[in-house]
Amino acid sequence: MRFPRFFTKKRGHRRTDSHAWGSFAEGFFYALLFGAGVVFGLLLVTGAVSYAPADPDSVVLQRGYEWWMWLLTLLIPVALLAFGGSGLARVVRTWGKSQEHRAAASRTVILQGLAGASPAAGHPGVPSCDNLENSPGIVLRYRLPLESPENWTLVGFGLFALLWNAVVVVLAVGVGADLIGGTTDWLLIGLLVPFVAVGVGGVVLFVRATVLSTSVGPTHVEISDHPLVPGMSYDVRLGQGGAHLFRSIDLGLELEETATFRQGTDTRTQRLVVRRVPVSRWQRVQPVPGGSFEARVSVTIPADAMHSFSSENNAVQWRIVVRALPDRWPEFTRVFPVVVLPVKALVTTAISETVEALE
Amino acid sequence: MTTADASHGDDHVPASTAQPFPRIELRFGHPSRGYDPGEWVTVEYCIEGLNGERPRALERSALWYTEGKGEEDLGVHSFERFATADTIDRVVPEGTFAIQLPTSPLSYEGVIVKIRWCIRLRVFFELGRDHVSEHVFNVGRVPPSILP
């Protein structure tokens, strides 16, 4: 009998490990966990370790565990049994099955929506539009939700400043207690100085980011229809608030590819804009005091455009992007995702809808 | 153990010659291998080099997968498995089948994300040995992406 090879070809010239050995090792790992759970559980339940730690010569006939103590004690064996058992069952269930067979059986295609879990109805791989169409516009049909990277930067700065300064406070309390007690720990004081400097820097960055995000005013984008179709034109209404002069405001379409990959134990995501379609540019814009700058333009989706796509680790997303350069502030970007359907899909849908309407 | 061969154009490239594995010739109804979404794909195939060995099972599938920087995602559109003696005789060593394509996803040649459609034939032999043959085709007419 021939043993499976340790290394086989995956695609092209790349080599990968053997599926058979991989499944065997995975099954062995889960079997070990399951076995450990069984052994620990039996030891605890049968009382094989029942003796009084303070008096090893005495045999304990009845232990004084409360019910919650039992639950706590059995937590680890039960977790081992559950984790090992479910993993082992999964390995057994998929043993010897091809990649296609497993995917077809469990439908692990995992088509994640842009903002929801279900794909657009009837369009496999196209993300759901639900969260993009639940807000009506003031003038046009839909108001698109904002996906601003600046907001996440703001949250990041805020969390960093909060956590870092919490550490600074703990150190400062220690130093203060020492000083009140009449002792001076120069090492602790020396450590505190750079910590305070970084803490102050974190607060300054957070305040600056907050001022930046609030002072330039909100951006609103409305669209006449959604989802979008290649070759079709749509009315888009832009509203930009703020009391400052804007040196320029650009509105355009962008196609962004997103790839998630693992490097060791890290999971990383790379984003890359592969297509830019400028729509309109306004220069030296002064919003109405107390109001906002408003403009209405026509946006045409390129006829050869790739449709929106989203799977577990890869995505192709269209978005309307607004880039503005305020007079005395740094440039900011605000992103409004949209879903573009495959052109043929819409033709098919339109025909079926027409037939239904006629019936 | 799995061996593989792949055909992305007219060439047929056997990946392993260390052991007498079969060779699978596959012909699409459209010689250009280009299809529109919703269109029917007809396929004729011929498995050569079995040397009298009878496969234990045959799997025919139409699927898309992603290539590029990200982890591979896979979506099986159509899957058939023939594992009984009488069904095996109907599909080995040659056979034809047809599948209707879905409306999406379309084939895409991006920069860090690529989507490919293919027909895969996987032949299973005794002792767990199997051989997979992959034949790529295009769905839709989306041009390749180029960095702006």
Image (spheres, rainbow, N blue to C red):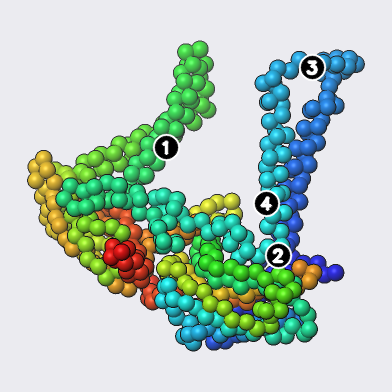
- The chain containing the residue under callout 2 comes to A
**Secondary-structure class at tag 3:** loop
The residue carrying pointer 4 sits among few (fewer than 14), some (14 to 19) or many (20 or more) residues within 10 Å by Cα, namely some
The residue carrying pointer 2 sits among few (fewer than 14), some (14 to 19) or many (20 or more) residues within 10 Å by Cα, namely some
Q: Which mark is residue A63?
A: 3
Furthest-top residue in this view: A181
> Are labels 2 and 4 assigned to the same chain?
yes
The residue that mark 4 highlights is A90
Task: Measuring from the top left, give residue B63's x and y in whole percent.
Answer: 53, 69
- Corner quadrant of residue A276: bottom left
Task: Measuring from the top left, give residue B126's x and y in whole percent.
Answer: 78, 71
The residue depicted at 69 percent of the width and 83 percent of the height is B93
**Secondary-structure class at tag 4:** helix
Q: Nearer the viewer, residue A79 or A348?
A: A348
The reply to whether callout 3 and callout 1 are in contact (CB within 8 Å) is: no
The residue that mark 1 highlights is A160
Residue type, label 1: Phe
The mark nearer the N terminus, 2 or 3, is 2
- Corner quadrant of residue A51: top right
